[in-house]
Amino acid sequence: MELRVEELRQEAEKLLMDVWNILPNDPNERVYSLYQIVCSQYETDPRESHRLYYFCSGFPPHFGTGELGHNINVGVGKMQRTLLHFAAEKNFQECTRKLLTFGFVDVNVGDSTGCTALHLACREGMKEIIKLLLKHPKVNINARDSTGCTPLHLVCRKGFEEITQLLLQQPESDVNVMDSTGCTPLLLALGGMHANSKACREGFQEIATWLLQHPHIDVNAGVITPFHLAAFCGNDWAVSLLVQHPDIDLYSRTAHKEMTALHMAACKDDADIVRMILDAVMRKTDPMWVRKGQFLSYQAYEQRLDVVKELLQSPGLDVNNRDERSFTALHLAVLRGHVTIVQLLLNHQNINLDIVTKCISDNDLERIRGWQEDGDWKKTPCPRLITYIPFQKVAGMTALHFALELVEEEAAIEDRSMEGMTGVVNVLLAHPNIDINIENENGESPLYGPLRRKLGPILIRLFGRYEDMVDPCVHLLRSYCKKGDLDMSLIDPVMEKLHTPLNRLNLKIDAAKFDTLPLIHKAVAVGKEELLSVLIDIQQLDDINAGDGEKRTPLHSAAIAGQMKSIQLLLIHPSLMANHEDLDNTCFLACLYELINIYLPLVSCSKCKQLVQSSIRT
């Protein structure tokens, strides 16, 4: 035996010298290349070939039949690979065939990464080696490496079509096994979890088709289903295949964000895929899922115009669907200031403009912030689900409330053009069914905000909706705002009364107090003739001669302030009583006695003449 080993050693050394320069640089690869050459040129028995391998690789030979089976399955080097590993990976077909004839060879032994010979052959696409390995009666086609991948995972990721067919033809092949990241072979065929890669958008169509045709395929398996992945990545052919599968779950949601595939397609603004999914839903199921889904709200806020158009064409869609805070798609479209989407929603025959929001609790706010700060699945650009919720704790807000608040912010805070939100306000006010009297929980109607910010153009549009009302307060504001002169010192008294719905106001303007003065007194005192002209034209006013706390009439106030034009406007009013006296028994002319430039022209008018004559008689 020792003589035979020596002869083999000498032959190996001679052969090594001849082929050294053409062998790979890696020492391990050189050993196995040499082993293949020796096996192909010498008809050595398995035991001596085994010993030659260990001798050439620097491992001491082990003698004895009892140890032979153990040693041939022992891995060497950093990767701890056996003869079968290297033969399979390097496509050494004759060597692989010979090793597989040994009854003691372990065809399923793994290297340091858990890869079997079949794993390595599949990863490198060695079709003939794979055929040899699959014929072995003990081969485990579902063996998993350290990452949980089976050989089928590897060929689906690489796109090896013929090898995929070979593996799928094996009756024991598991097509639904997940690797450590939750990927099934089908997910990998669609490009895996690399949602931004070209592979994920294109995938391997033939392989995916074969997998979907497998009798045991679970089309909904995976940490994220193939349906979600295809919809998110815009893979239209994959979506088309998946929606036709009889077992597809069109309603499945991701575990983390509770997203459906339709949500994902909508948030990616892919109208074609949205249409495919909606058509499938209508064909396969009761469309209640579409009607009650909240994806319309999400993509309305994300300003996905094409998708909004597609969804609004869906039969039975609930355009007024509310989330847990009663936000509708209209609220969210208004918050983004997208005039076209707002108009599309308003054109829907079932739109309800008067839905009000609910208050967001502190717990909800914390939960929402947590969702916003949480990372997306696999660090891919996941659609925003909760970011549309404004951190607004005031309840009872209609879409018009939000629109008018945003106009205020643009005008007063950011100093930007109001064209965007003004356009939203215009289309809302143009709708015949809008109710502009709804209060929020603070008792504020939509009119309150523009008044607070003195937004004259917006106020004029709002007042246009009150044309059929006779309330003097509304009449006053509408008329006064048309003159473009908004003085908050005069508007504040009226604003104090606008915390209640305008259609319930039963107030008289001259009874609205500000600094203890009725509004008409304040107007004449500061010389606001435009406002005064509006006030005296309102028929619902109380007696124009009503006094303040000291029984002074508006005429007294105008005289004390020396407002000539205001006095003239009051004097021509048919109901004016020019001889009214205050608590000091003083008429208005007495207040003007020292103002000769005003007094003299006035005493020539008929009412003043009568007053003077009456005073003389008295």
Image (cartoon, rainbow, N blue to C red):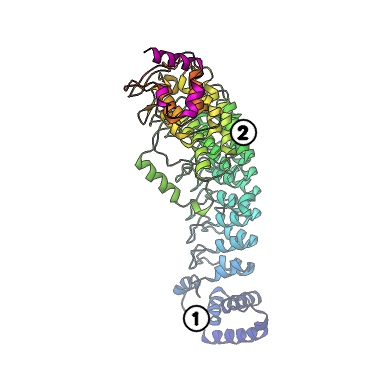
Could you tell whether 6 is left or right of 236 in the image? left
Q: Amino acid at mark 2?
A: Glu
Residue 178 showing in the rendered view: no
Q: Between marks 1 and 2, how big is the CA–CA gap?
A: 70 Å
Q: Looking at the image, do the residues carrying marks 1 and 2 touch, with CB atoms under 8 Å apart?
A: no
Residue 424 image position (x, y, % from top left): 57, 33
Q: In terms of secondary structure, what is the magenta stretch mainly?
A: helix
Is 614 colored magenta in this rendering?
A: yes
Callout 1: SS: loop
Instruction: Please name whichever residue, 458 or 527, is drawn nearer the observer in this view of the structure.
Output: 527
Q: State whether residue 30 is above or below residue 343.
A: below
Residues in magenta, as a range: 588-617
Residue at image mark 2: 310
Relative height, residue 559 to residue 58 (above, below): above
Residue designated by label 1: 59
Horizontal side, residue 423 vs residue 476: left or right: right
To which quarter of the image does residue 507 belong? top left
Q: Nearer the viewer, residue 476 or 554?
A: 554
